[in-house]
Amino acid sequence: MEITAVRPAGPQSEMKARIAATIAAAREEILDLSHRIHANPEPAFEERLASAWVAESVARHGYTVERPAGRLETAVRGTLRCGRGPGSRVAILAEYDALPGIGHACGHNTMAASGVGAAIGLAAVASELRGEIVFLGTPAEERGSGKQFMLDDGLFKGIDAALLFHPGDSTRIEARLLASEDVDVTFLGRASHAAAEPWEGRNALDALILLFNSVGLWRQQLRPESRVHGIILEGGTAANIIPDRGVARFMVRSPDQTYFEGMRRHFRELCDAAALATGCTVEVAFSGRSDTMRHNRVLGARYLANLEAYGLHEDPPSENLGSSDMGNVSQVLPTIHPSLAICERGVPGHSIEFREAARSERADEVTLIAATVAAQVACELLADPALVEAAWRDFRGTTV
């Protein structure tokens, strides 16, 4: 689709048309960034190339850039003051971490490029707006909840709205997210010869297997929308040595915050039980918490109106739920996290098929549309203080 051939939704349609034209003119720069990040996947907290590239891109378009921003080496913060004086602060976000071993199978390359594209589009009209545009490059969404570090470091302070798109197999405006937390579990036993003196050992791998079996049985009593899943990271070094160390990583998830707290407690009890049964000790470390999503209806309505001008409409709701630290941001300020389809429905995220879709022609076009729509919504907010206040009223009236 040629985004410059479409008349944008009102209000500020003339300014929005210039945003679209600017993004279209920067097409090569934006899509080259997407493809470079896709070709050079970096896992959580290690996105050195990607963060440098997005920082360089927004700096070229007039943003004052901090990198690192806060405590995270790969976090980026760019700011651009608008020309008509003080006003609202609107944040355009970008993600760029990849999945270990499978690369950009969640399509974060498109999220980084669309965020940069939106920042480029807004720079073209900043002189006619009030307030400040804030670009935030946010590391470690897949593991570790980088946005929570950035919240704690004050990088979202004073921001009135946060906008971030996510690629998917369907298009929907309201994100429904599961509360989630990473759990690293380490069992410590005693090594011994597995044939000569097995009775002298305390088998840490047995403790891990018992924990996995306990989780499997627990799933029968879990609510169907809740999730517990994990992998074994260490399980011994040789078949003739009783393993004295076993390490696993789990994720615990639920769409209900209160139910999630109960799951968290019970998971810890299962770890203690496995340790007791095998004579081992256990260390349990929770980290990287992601919260449920508080979707802002005012921002969502404006996003949909601007999206529909480009002929895209919402798909029927999906029951496939994931987690994101964008939920943490949504607990603090008006936030939306819409999904736009880059592939056919049914292509699973975190798969080879989705990774390939993230560098397809369709993904490229969606990246440009996502950049354009995010910038147009931000333009509305920076031009209309009443819209910002309406978003805050909706936020304050939302029941978690």
Image: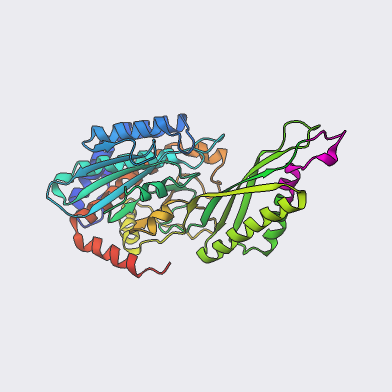
What residue sits 63% from the left and 50% below the top?
A: 229
The residue positioned farthest toward the left in the image shown:
84
The answer to which quarter of the image holds residue 190 is: top right
177 to the left or right of 203: left
What residue sits 40% from the left and 57% below the top?
A: 173
Q: Residue 235 at x, y = what percent?
A: 70, 38
The span shown in magenta is 192-210
What residue sits 27% from the left and 46% below the top?
A: 134
Q: Residue 61 at x, y = what percent?
A: 23, 35
What residue sits 49% from the left and 42% below the top?
A: 106
The residue positioned farthest toward the front in the image shown:
200
The answer to which quarter of the image holds residue 56 is: top left
| Residue 200 is one of the magenta-drawn residues | yes
Quadrant (top left, top right, bottom left, bottom right) of the N terminus: top left
Q: Nearer the viewer, residue 180 or 195?
A: 195
217 to the left or right of 57: right
| Residue 361 is one of the magenta-drawn residues | no
Quadrant (top left, top right, bottom left, bottom right) of the C terminus: bottom left
Does 319 appear above or below 63? below
**Does residue 63 appear anywhere in the picture?**
yes
**Does residue 1 appear anywhere in the picture?**
no
Q: Residue 6 at x, y = what percent?
A: 27, 48
Q: Nearer the viewer, residue 83 or 153?
A: 153
Q: Nearer the viewer, residue 285 or 354?
A: 285
Q: Residue 82 at x, y = what percent?
A: 16, 46
Does 9 appear above or below 392? above
